[in-house]
Structure formats: structure tokens, C-alpha cells
Image (cartoon, grey):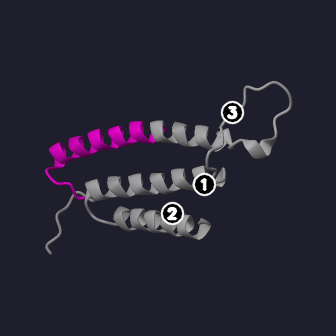
């Protein structure tokens, strides 16, 4: 299971890097999104993959850590998703503004003669 998740994270991150190297701004933003999803998945998996385990305990007494999932990775990923959504909205607004001012959506601002 760990190998499949590691390969999936690697493919997602590699696809993001490939898209960042593209000449269009929308492709760059999509690459940044894919990379952030890969990092979020990595952080989430580092808290271990638990099935049917509660994230927190409200029972009195000393809890057994083996009975509960790690809530820290879940909280970090949730925060990263919210921050990623806000920065993506900012990137899209900047992309639309740059497209309106320059008339092109190339990263360097110049159309290539391909």
C-alpha cells in the first residue's frame, strides 16, 4: 500500500513540475495546484494510514495511542487546503489581469513563432 501511495505522490508531483515548465500561465497555475495536492497527500500519509480509527478521544483516563489516528497531519492538511484555495484565487486574478494588460497568457509575455 505504501508503495502505491508513494508512486501516486511522485507522479502527481512530477506532473506538477512538468506543467510549471510550460509557457502558458494557466498551465503554471495548474502545475502549482498539482504540486500542492501532492504535498498535502504526503503530509496526510505521514500521519499513517488508519482505517476506522477516531482522530481524538474524549474518554476519561489515559488513552492508548494505538487506538487513535494522528490528528496533527489532518489539521495541517486542512489548513493547507484553505491556504491553497486562497492563493489559487489570487493567482487566477493576477493571471486575468496580466492577460488583460499584455494581451497574451505567456509567462514571459511574448508569443513564440512555433
Magenta-highlighted residues: 83-106
At label 3, counting other C-alpha atoms closer than 10 Å, the crowd grade (few under 14, some 14-19, many 20 or more) is: few
Mostly what secondary structure, the magenta segment?
helix
Residue at the spot x=36%, y=43% of the render?
88
Residue 38: % across, % down: 49, 57
Front in this rendered view, residue 56 or 26: 56
Q: Residue furthest bottom?
A: 114
- Tell me if mark 2 has few (under 14), some (14-19) or many (20+) residues whose alpha carbon lies within 10 angstroms of its own: many
Which residue lies under the disc numbered 1?
Answer: 45
Q: Horizontally, is 103 left or right of 83 in the view?
A: left
Q: Nearer the viewer, residue 20 or 5?
A: 5
Q: Find numbered disc 2 in the image and state the secondary structure of the residue it sits on.
A: helix
Residue 22 location, quadrant: bottom left
Q: Quadrant of residue 42?
A: bottom right
Q: Residues within 10 Å of mark 1 (few under 14, many from 20)?
A: some
Dot label at residue 9: 2
- Cβ atoms at labels 2 and 1 below 8 Å apart: yes
Judge depth for marks 3 and 1 and give the one in front: 3
Instruction: Identify the image quadrant of the N terminus.
Output: bottom right
The first of marks 2 and 1 along the sequence is 2
Which residue is under mark 3? 56
Amino acid at each position: 500500500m505504501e508503495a502505491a501511495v508513494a508512486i501516486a505522490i511522485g507522479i502527481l508531483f512530477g506532473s506538477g513540475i512538468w506543467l510549471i515548465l510550460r509557457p502558458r500561465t494557466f498551465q503554471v497555475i495548474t502545475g502549482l495546484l498539482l504540486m500542492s495536492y501532492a504535498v498535502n497527500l504526503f503530509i496526510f500519509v505521514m500521519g499513517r494510514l488508519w482505517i476506522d480509527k477516531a482522530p481524538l478521544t474524549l474518554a476519561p483516563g489515559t488513552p492508548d495511542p494505538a487506538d487513535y489516528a494522528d490528528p496533527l497531519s489532518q489539521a495541517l492538511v486542512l489548513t493547507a487546503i484553505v491556504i491553497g484555495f486562497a492563493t489559487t484565487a489570487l493567482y487566477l486574478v493576477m493571471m486575468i489581469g496580466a492577460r488583460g494588460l499584455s494581451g497574451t497568457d505567456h509567462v514571459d509575455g511574448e508569443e513564440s513563432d512555433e
